[in-house]
Image (cartoon, helix red, strand yellow):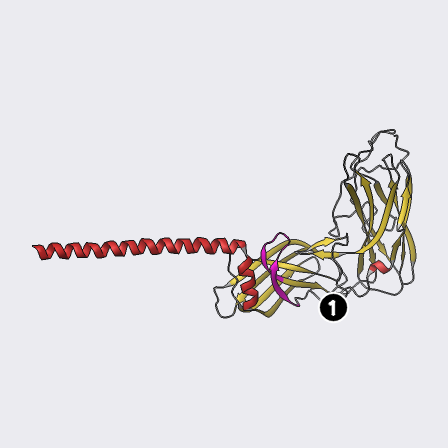
Amino acid sequence: MRIKRWRCLLAIVVVLGVTLGLSSGVTQAAKHKGMKIPAESKATFMIMPELPQDNIGGNHLGYFNLRMKTGQERSVRVQIYNPTSETLNIYGQIKDATTRENASVDYYGNMLPNRKLLTDPGSQYVSVDKKTVLPAGATKWITIKVKTKHPFKGVKATAVNLSSMQANQKSAVKNIYRYAIGVVLTGEKIGKNHYQFIETPSIKTGFTKNRKAAIRIKVNNPDPMYLKHAQMKVKLQNDKWQFIQYSQTLKDGKVAPNSDFDLDVLLGGKRLVPGTYQLTLTTKNDRYTKTLHKQVLITKVQARYINRLNAAYLRNRNWILVGLVVIFLITAGLVVQRVRKRKRDRHAKDGQ
């Protein structure tokens, strides 16, 4: 199969740039006309966005960043190519950007947006064909349409998800390939005096996705702007016992506009002590530096639950118990030995 004329063939592209905290991808260009691509290639289809000349940040980025005015309509395009020997169905969806736990941005819709924060989602302004049939060896354009309804401040972060399913002929497995193309809508500038800053509405105890015990601090970004290069330091200080504290530091986080996430304070092998705590959260990002103070309560029920299931703490506790038993046995042995020695000495003295 020979490749048709192509401005720049992409072997695998994840078209989300680094500047806005999007996942960067690798572009591989075909060097020779007529280069053959095997049908069993892992890339079931290829994509290349056509960035407009007025793209904010330049047209060398891997995503669209469009300045929008009220009532404005515009269209941008993505070129798709099918290097396989089979017809592919390309499915399109629009997703609002969210923030994963511990501050990384998600553009694949793996998490539902917080509608209390994202009251006017960008996904309602962006549309794409739900299905495009792409014959073997064919090239097509997919059009992304944008239309704003009213003025807005800051940015609305969305992504066009293009996906296709390809059956593995050697097995019954079907592989789904998906690409996320960032579509950021930029409205009126937000003045620094209008920043709402991060919030911490609640805390809870629980486990991370990799089953690590943690105190989970809910963090809200109520502003319609990215928080990039975010450094966050959280500390919980027990009000009654000053030597009891838990802390965690996050470096180089990325937070999506109008989103929330859990910031995890990992317990490791520590026991969680119930009580009232002074929570201090300091964040520094490309927009501002802010410190929050809040009094929070960790209940006995929460502490009991997390301690009962925290494997690292249970291991430490068991080792401590074993150590205490060993110390007790050694001490008891020494005491018994000393008592016997005294008895022997007393008997020896009485026999003289």
Dot 1 falls on a residue whose secondary structure is: helix
Residue 225, image x, y percentages = 76, 60
Q: Which is nearer the eye, 193 or 333?
A: 333
Note whether 212 is above or below 295 in the view shown.
Answer: above
Which residue is at the far front? 172
Q: Is residue 318 left or right of residue 177?
A: left
Query: Relative to 199, is 77 on the left or the right?
Result: right
Nearest the eye: 155 or 201:
201
Residue appearing at x 81%, y 59% in the figure: 156
Provide residue 143's location: percent of width, then percent of height. 91, 49
Residue 209 is covered by the magenta coloring: yes
Q: Which residue is depicted at the point 8% across and 55% down?
A: 351
Quarter of the image that includes the N terminus: top right
Q: Magenta span covers which residues?
A: 201-216
The quarter of the picture where residue 172 lies is: top right
Could you say where residue 94 lies in the image, as x and y percent from the top left?
83, 54
Which image quarter is the C terminus in? bottom left
Is 180 positioned to the left or the right of 311 in the image? right
Q: Is residue 91 magenta?
A: no
Task: Give the labeled residue for mark 1.
Answer: 193
Up-down: is 195 above or below 25? below
Say which amino acid is labelled 1. Answer: Asn
Identify the residue at horizontal 20%, vertical 54% (top origin). 341
Residue 12: give x, y in percent of width and height: 79, 39
Work out whether 193 lies above or below 108. Answer: below
Q: How would you rate the neighbour count of disc 1 (Cα within 10 Å): few for under 14, some for 14-19, many for 20 or more?
A: few
